[in-house]
Amino acid sequence: MKICVGLSGGVDSSVAALLLKQQGYDVFAMFMQNWHDTEGTLHGDCEWEEEKFIAELVARKIGIPFYFVDLSTQYMAQVADYMFDEYARGRTPNPDVLCNSQIKFGAFLDAARRLGADMVATGHYCRKETLPDGSCRILEGSDPNKDQSYFLCQLTQEQLSAALFPIGHLTKPEVRRIAAEADLPSAERKDSQGICFVGKVDLPVFLQQKLQSVEGDIVEVYRTFYEGMPERTTLPEMCTPFDYSPIRFETETYRSGRHHIRKTRYKPNPYGAVIGRHEGAQFYTLGQRKGLAVGGHKDPLFVIATDIDRNIVYVGEGQDHPGLYRRALLIAPDEIHWIRTDLPLGEDLRCLVRIRYRQPLQDAVLMRRDEGLYIVFDEPQRSITPGQFAVWYAADGEMLGSGVISQ
């Protein structure tokens, strides 16, 4: 069997290639370039060239052929444009999930097959099992601190049938040890960060390549806003974000200083205050703490909502602010993705769910209704973010499906 390893220059994919070679497979490596524009990236112009250089050294050390493929056109069309569009709508996409489903197991898989590959292997920390009927199960990685199954939540059965995850049964320290014992050039390299195959970025600067910067107000929402609100009990109510548009601010003029200069200020409002300015509501995401540049508070401020049409960023003080939490979310019918299409799935399903990478799994119930798939959590969840992926698992760690959060 001929296997193409997606070699990134990191230690994980390097050890994946090494293990497959040791197991006797016909292995070759391929490095993909997905991005050319370095505006907004934090590591300079030639980061991908360094990654490629290390990957080529690894391939030479292992003794496998090395190829290069430029998939930047496909990445822009299938991942980057989607990411820019989502931010423009006030949603927060996860480009790494799309990079895996559309690029690594899409365009990259096609390129590997043109070179004769039967399967593609990556350095993801997750496990795959093939059942007697040929269908595939994908499970969490054995290392609970490095499980990366979340990023593969949009793969199809066809894609999984061509996928291998050689290090999914290992822990990160074990991978480091194997790399060191084999004297691989990537053994001591730090884990990559940032957007998949783009790198670590200054997000506002990165997004300004496509999105215009426009100043607007930062509004703090006081806890008094929520006092007296009726309890949310129906599924639509539990999913609906709070509406802060009723918080309006009137101005008044006053005289200040020795010369009684006329100035304008906002009248006091019992529900909130304008406390700062931002450069564009689309550059902020729910739960965000850094980048607000507003002081004078005892506890940290967090973004609790954005109003793209009015260009307002709403914030709340403290990690327990009511605006940060909801009990449920909704996934639109056309955004529901089941990995195991062979399972008999009833109207309601109790399972474990995470709404962001590395979040501990949360107890929840999936409820299928005409308007989509509701996920109702046993405990309120912080910063349920439209555009992100909710991923659900069985009790044994099998990833069953996922969907883009609509609200």
Image: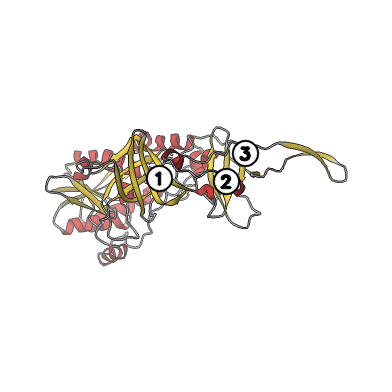
**Which of labels 1 and 3 is toward the front?**
3
Q: Quadrant of residue 106?
A: top left
Q: Which residue is mark 1?
A: 198
In space, the residues marked 1 and 2 are separated at their CA atoms by 41 Å
Identify the amino acid type marked 3: Ile
Mark number displayed over residue 226: 2
User: Observer-nearest residue: 177 or 167?
Assistant: 167
| Number of the label disc, if any, that sits on residue 381 | none
Q: Is residue 222 visible?
A: no
Number of numbered callouts drawn: 3
Instruction: Please identify the quarter of the rendering in which residue 239 is found.
Output: top left
Going 62% across and 39% down the picture, which residue do you hit?
247
Circle 1/circle 3 CB separation < 8 Å: no
Name the mark on residue 247.
3
Q: Position of residue 302 (x, y in %)?
A: 55, 50
Compute the Cα span from label 3 to label 2: 12 Å
Nearest the eye: 322 or 22: 322
Disc 3 element: loop
Q: Give the secondary structure at mark 2.
A: helix
The 10 Å Cα crowd at callout 1, few under 14, some 14 to 19, many 20 or more, is some
The secondary structure type at the circle numbered 1 is loop
Q: Mark 3 packing: few (<14 Cα in 10 Å), some, or many (20+)? A: some
Residue 102, image x and y in percent?
30, 39
Residue 221 placement, left or right of 143: right
What kind of residue is marked 2? Tyr
Three-letter code, disc 1: Val
